[in-house]
Amino acid sequence: MNSNNKLNRRQFLSTAAIAGTGAIVAGGTTLSSCASAADPKKPVRVPIERLKTWRIPNLIDKVVDGRELKIGLVGCGGQGTGDLIGAAKCGDNIKVVALGDVLRDRLDSSRDRVKKDAGQEVPESNCFVGLDAYKKVIDLVDVVLLITPPAYRPIHFEYAVKAGKHVFMEKPICVDVAGYNKLVASAKIADTKKLCVCTGTQRRHERRYVEAYKQILDGAIGEITGGAVYWNQSQLWSKKPEKETAEWMIRDWVNWTWLSGDHIVEQHVHNIDVFNWFSGLKPVAGTAFGARHRRPTGDQYDMFSVDYEYENGIHMHSMSRQINGCTDNVSEFVQGSLGSWSSRNEIKDLQGNVIWKYEGDKGTQNNPYVLEFIDLFSAVRQNKPFNETIDTANSSLQAVLGRESAYTGKRIVFDELKASNMDLLSHPALAALQNESVDVRDVKIDFSQFPIPVPGKGN
């Protein structure tokens, strides 16, 4: 259900200019003055205990040998197809057996690419079209890739878990509270069934990030005192609707909030997740503003700025923008009491001296989009616990909080948002889509029922 875009998001990630940021220290935090007995000028590293609960992946170059894994894809756009090809080629004895999408042309294109680029042909009998295609794919596989527009991620994940299947699902994994709650419930069941789940937050499987995380865990920058995260880039693709139908909303899905969550959720969740991962802190509230200047379709904004409040009075600034002709910056920055880390791959002390730098990838496989599949499939074959759902659900909902604060102009408390009944799929204009037997080409939708939010007016 994803669409091809002129600027592939993962290509952008690998080529975006990473801009540095100044040190950010939240008010009310006492800086450490501890020093080493051997060297009074050298601060003593104190490991951050709460970070020890995070899983550190074993980044090997190839999936461990084992039984055949049958995999299938739900959501045959450019993103999903690229992920499937990478998954099929990350080890031996991995077989693509099924494809599913709501649009036949997307499925056919994906099928052709899988044959050409992965050397595997999916039989026509295992190609499924429709809102219920996900069930048919899931029933045939050991591991399913869920890469439709994220509005449907919780529904598809729930079915996969009930069917006892391992899952790769792209971020974000929810766009509202109803989806979040469904994910959390399914994740708990997945743990009882010992299912493995990877969630597309590929930085957690990228060597430079993992090595930096180990340094921060060891106390290299001291206690976390603040940070800033960015995803600023040019405008993504859009599809001018030919008709006001569900089909054309889906073809233009990155521009509609109910489908994508808005770009603060759909893309910027990566950067928010990095701060949550590196700090181990829990969000408390957020205050945001945003605007729409040049986006040609849909009901979303094209820029956001959020002040996220965390426990212990820590603040993190979040900025995301999709406007052509502006400065690009996709990066993260974490300030600590003894120094700082930035995604330039270096750690500095409080005087600005570089005290650690990642010198380069070690291994023959350094693509994080492949390494995450190696990690997942190896865990499946070795029966090792692996479930990223809760962490990514929390980061996704935190991005939702930023969106809603910008849309309304209100400060929003994280726990109050979690307790709300927000359910974007329950919009009256989408009622016909509750019937999975309908053809999305025939479902008429009044686009005027999705106005652009105006802060301060209670939208």
Image (cartoon, rainbow, N blue to C red):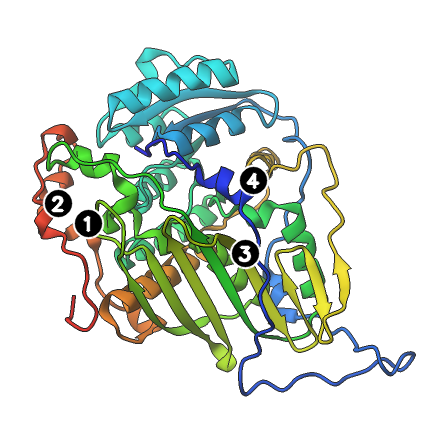
Label 1 sits on a secondary structure element that is helix
Mark linked to residue 179 = none
Q: Which residue is mark 4?
A: 372
Q: Which residue is mark 2?
A: 430
**Residue at coordinates 27% horizontally, 41% vertically from top-left?**
253
**Residue at coordinates 21% horizontally, 69% vertically from top-left?**
455
Please state which of the two labelled residues, at mark 3 or mark 1, is closer to the viewer: 3
**Residue at coordinates 39% horizontally, 30% vertically from top-left?**
78
Task: Indicate which disc, 3 or 1, sits on the residue closer to the N terminus.
Answer: 3
- In the picture as drawn, the residue positioned furthest to the front comes out as 325
Name the residue type under label 3. Answer: Ser
Q: Which residue is mark 3?
A: 331
The N terminus is located in which quarter? Answer: top left
**Residue at coordinates 38% horizontally, 18% vertically from top-left?**
111
Q: Position of residue 238 (x, y in %)?
A: 28, 39
Residues at circles 4 and 3 in contact by the CB criterion of under 8 Å: no
Mark 1 → mark 4, Cα distance in angstroms: 30 Å
Residue 360 lies, with reference to residue 394, above or below; the image says above
Task: Indicate which disc, 2 or 4, sits on the residue closer to the N terminus.
Answer: 4
